[in-house]
Image: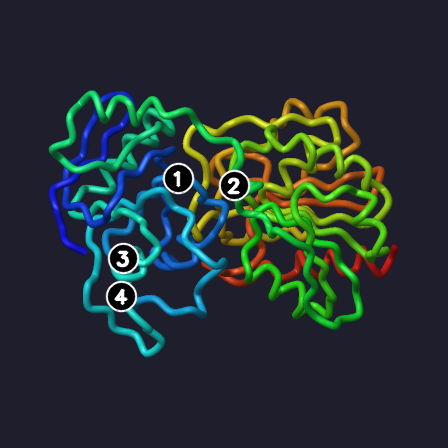
Amino acid sequence: MQKIKGKLVFKDGSCYEGELLGNRDAVGEVVFTTGMSGYQETLTDPSFCDQIVVSTYPLVGNYGVADVFKQSSRCWYQGYVVSELCEEPSNWRSEGTLGKFLEDNNIPVLTGVDTRAITRKIRKHGTLQGVIVRSDMPQEEIDALLNTPETHDQVVRTTTPKVYTRGTGKYSVAVMDYGIKQNILDYLVSFDCTITVFPAETDAKEVLAINPDGIFLSNGPGDPEDLVIEIENIKKMLGKKPIFGICMGHQIMALANGAKTMKMKFGHRGINHPVRDLVEDRISITSQNHGYVVDEDSLKNLPVEIINRSLNDNTIEGVKYLEHPSFSVQYHPEGAPGPYGNEYLFERFIKMMEEK
């Protein structure tokens, strides 16, 4: 890709100039992620749908790209902001450069900017809408882009278009796909599960008709309160089968049980977030990608138990439901990208299915 002068412009008027690679403008919510690696996994994680993502680590692309790291069939970013994009990767698994990967997926990338200064701005002022454009774009065109209405159909665009199955294991699991990562499916299969993956808005009757041993609610992008159909279907499945939810699944599970969610100032995104498990009395380093959180005040009169908390800001990271065999966590319990060590959550789900 040919480099031209470009810039990231926030809705409050602040501007960061650098070099732009790409053939289109990017418009979206600007967020940051703190991982030192795992850039290809995050690029292909549907939970990042429609966002402009800033990498706090100063160098990306140094180990190239490879199909083994992909978490879905395409990139979901609106745009990418990095300090330095490595053009000559070195790794035995590398199958190409990150720059070519971004070009093939039509993702504009702004390089040569101080990403840590941008991160400090987001942490201070909160998440803002922004655009990545060429430096010579007229201000009126930039203002028009910044006033683009927000989209609310990310889950519909990222979910599977049809039902499919994987694995031949002992336990039958119905997976509700709100924008799932492939590695989560791999984990479920590795835990002796036969999984049937359903589109996000599938009616509860159709899901329960396969008589699964358990139901898994996946990660996904956007505002959980937008998922009215999905929440109503979860209500119809409560108590029928054991349920394990993660990330978006955690949030809409809470909404289905009468709780509320709220938008965070700048969210949790990265592969180094410490979480305390109050049940196991252990601390885990976790992979996270969310901008919303369950409102703790809304849980006060509900039959639930808080089972995980963030050690960074004390927000809720896990909930156990006391009137039906269900639990959920806010983080991703597998390492793509991120650390291993949270597989015990899948084991907990398996035990629930065995007891049921």
Look at the image and tell me in which quarter the N terminus lies. Answer: bottom left
- Cα–Cα span, label 4 and label 3: 10 Å
* Residue 68 drawn at (x, y percent): 45, 70
Number of other residues with Cα within 10 Å of mark 2, as a class: few under 14, some 14 to 19, many 20 or more: many
Q: Amino acid at mark 3?
A: Val
- Cα–Cα span, label 1 and label 2: 10 Å
Q: Are marks 4 and 3 in contact (CB under 8 Å)?
A: no
Q: Disc 3 or 2, which lies upstream in sequence?
A: 3
Number of other residues with Cα within 10 Å of mark 3, as a class: few under 14, some 14 to 19, many 20 or more: many
Q: Amino acid at mark 4?
A: Thr
Q: Which mark is residue 258?
A: none
Q: Disc 1 or 2, which lies upstream in sequence?
A: 1
Q: Disc 1 or 3, which lies upstream in sequence?
A: 1
Between label 3 and label 2, give the one nearer the viewer: 2
- Cα–Cα span, label 4 and label 1: 22 Å
Q: Are marks 1 and 2 in contact (CB under 8 Å)?
A: yes
Q: Which residue is labeled 3 in the image?
A: 60
Number of other residues with Cα within 10 Å of mark 1, as a class: few under 14, some 14 to 19, many 20 or more: many
Between label 4 and label 3, give the one nearer the viewer: 4
Q: Which residue is labeled 2 in the image?
A: 221
Q: Which residue is labeled 1 in the image?
A: 51
Q: Which residue is labeled 4 in the image?
A: 97
Please give the name of the residue rendered at 77% of the width and 45% of the height, measured from the top-left corner.
326
* Residue 190 drawn at (x, y percent): 66, 70
Q: Amino acid at mark 1?
A: Gln
Please give the name of the residue rendered at 38% of the width and 46% of the height, measured from the top-left corner.
77
Element carrying mark 4: loop
